[in-house]
Amino acid sequence: MPPDELNSLRQYFLERPSVAIPTPNSLPGNFLAYVERTIDWDEFWRRRTAPPIARAGEGAANASAQALSEASLSLAVYEPVPKQKLDGRISVDVLGGPAEHVSLSEGRSLGSGSRNWVIILAGITLAVLATIANTLIWVFHMGEWIPYAAHGGEWIFSALMLIVVAWARFNSPPTNRSGTTFALFYFGVVSYSALLMSFWLFVIIALWQSSISFDKAALWLGGAANPAAQEEMNLYVPLVAAFVIVVAANLPWLRRVDNAAREVCMNLAAIPREADRLAFELAQTADFQPKSELRARVTKIVTESIGPQALNFEPDGTVEAGLTRAVGLYSLFVGPNSQGMKLEFANARTRAAYARIIQLNKTTVAQVDARYEELMQAAEAYFRTPHPPRELKEALKRSIIEVSQLTCSLIAGYVLYCNVTANARHQQLSNMGLL
């Protein structure tokens, strides 16, 4: 979630003396529905990203008032949430409301939306593959096509080429893999590959029918058909059809169709919703308990740069706790790359994954480094002022939110990228001190 929307929710629910019931389909209204479990995370995300539609009869004043109310909401990352461990899960009090159980070990949304998407995806994929199988059976069942089935090399090579093309297109940009879980990503790849295969079979049939039509036209014009030439051409129809699909994707209108199909499969694979969901949980509800070496490093940074009064490892909701947590998250994940700190949580296998995530997210890493410098400057100004004004406190809060949210987005991408199962992701987060 962008920091401005988090700020909006915090101001609406936490900083007002009294909170009115939010307008339906507004950002606070949708968030309240999500907390009350009337909608799941996927539906909340869809409503948040859907373009607003003005209803007939509503004036410009109403639209401006709604936009102003949504722009005034806010939720601070540093705010604490009472929590306790219950059977490996986290009990959190979302925005001071009823306790809700959230499991960071499960690579799915808090509701049942992701599970439903997996079922829908399985049905769609099986239906497409069944259609392809039935088409192949129908094609090869006809006696005149049986001789061509013996030339399987063209079919195998063409199918493999399309699978490689589908993988390259679906994983563009390369950060797509770190935007969702292993299972959902490969479900998306299979779905996109099935769509390409369906179009491939359609082109094959069209080419076969065209060759028959050309022979009929030659006979009609008084010429003679050449069965040997037609048979030779039909043998290479699968390969020609595959090349047609690859080359035709460069045409503008076909590129738009291909992009739309790829976008549908990416949405089904929850890219990047799954990474955003995990980043939101890590930034908002996860209990961060740094290991002893990291705790000592954070203590040294805070006390030497700002002062001992700014250090607080207890999640008690104070600015000191928020600052210490943000510095700890930065030192855990971004510090080893930017400031040469020790990388504590990675082993020989996951170091390559860490380097790749940093390489693929250079822009985000640069933003975190810049926000971290602003955080330290804001913290120094706040804690070294005898009676800091409200403006200094608000500036420090904003810096805490931005550093925490951006760092957790990188951590979420790393955990999703290098762990296949939900248990492995949970173990990785536990090793990093995010329980």
Image (cartoon, rainbow, N blue to C red):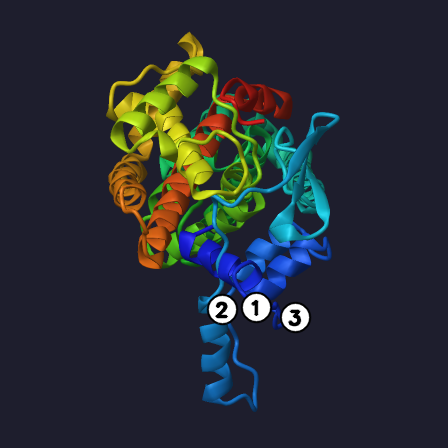
- Measure the C-alpha gap from mark 2 to mark 3: 13 Å
Mark 3 lies on a secondary structure that is loop
Q: Please give left or right for residue 60 compared with residue 268 in the image.
A: left
Closer to the eye: label 2 or 3: 3
Q: Are discs 3 and 1 less than 8 Å apart at CB?
A: no
Residue 94 sits above or below residue 232 on the image? below
Question: Which residue is drawn at the image coordinates 50% and 42% (left, top)?
Answer: 196
Query: Of callouts 3 and 1, which one flags the residue occurring earlier in the amino acid sequence?
Result: 3
Q: Please give left or right for residue 168 compared with residue 112 in the image.
A: left
Which residue is denoted by mark 3 in the rendering? 21
The three-letter code of the residue at mark 1 reads: Ser
The three-letter code of the residue at mark 3 reads: Ile
Which residue is denoted by mark 1 in the rendering? 26
Mark 1 lies on a secondary structure that is loop
Question: Which residue is drawn at the image coordinates 44% and 16% (left, top)?
Answer: 345
Query: Of callouts 1 and 2, which one flags the residue occurring earlier in the amino acid sequence?
Result: 1
Which residue is denoted by mark 2 in the rendering? 70
- Measure the C-alpha gap from mark 3 to mark 1: 11 Å
The three-letter code of the residue at mark 2 reads: Glu
State the image quarter where residue 429 is shown: top right
Mark 2 lies on a secondary structure that is helix
